[in-house]
Amino acid sequence: MVDYIKESYSELKNHVTWTPWAEAQRLTVIVAVFSLLLALAVWGVDTVFSKLISLYFEWIKS
């Protein structure tokens, strides 16, 4: 188990290419913005469908 941990650490330290910090921050902001836009779009569609279904059932009721 100790050898596995040592080899894993060595692999991460010597063979993995890490994204530069500035680029990681920029990409994080992009992902956050698109996530927010997608959440707003889903909320909008949900609101419209909810109102349409409510109107439909009110129309059926009367």
Image (cartoon, rainbow, N blue to C red):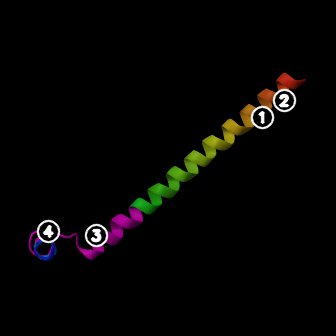
Distance from Cα at disc 3 to Cα at disc 4? 16 Å
Q: What amino acid type should be assigned to the residue bearing mark 3? A: Glu
Please report the residue visible at 27 percent of the width from the left and 76 percent of the height from the top.
21
- Residue 22: image quadrant is bottom left
Chain-order first, disc 3 or disc 1: 3
Relative side of 32 to 18, left or right: right
Res 23 label: 3
Q: In the displayed orientation, state which residue is furthest to the right.
A: 62
Please report the residue visible at 74 percent of the width from the left and 38 percent of the height from the top.
51
- The residue mark sitting in front, 2 or 4, is 4
Element assignment for label 3:
helix
> Are circles 2 and 4 on residues that touch, CB within 8 Å?
no
> Are circles 1 and 2 on residues that touch, CB within 8 Å?
yes
Q: What amino acid type should be assigned to the residue bearing mark 4? A: Val
Residue at the spot of label 4: 16
Relative side of 60 to 48, left or right: right
Q: What amino acid type should be assigned to the residue bearing mark 2? A: Glu
Distance from Cα at disc 4 to Cα at disc 1? 54 Å
Distance from Cα at disc 3 to Cα at disc 1? 46 Å
Q: What amino acid type should be assigned to the residue bearing mark 1? A: Ser
Position of the C terminus, as image quadrant, is top right
Residue at the spot of label 2: 58
Residue at the spot of label 1: 54
> Are circles 3 and 4 on residues that touch, CB within 8 Å?
no
**Which x, y percent locates residue 49?**
67, 36
> Are circles 4 and 1 on residues that touch, CB within 8 Å?
no
User: Neighbour class for label 2 at 10 Å: few (<14), some, many (≥20)?
Assistant: few
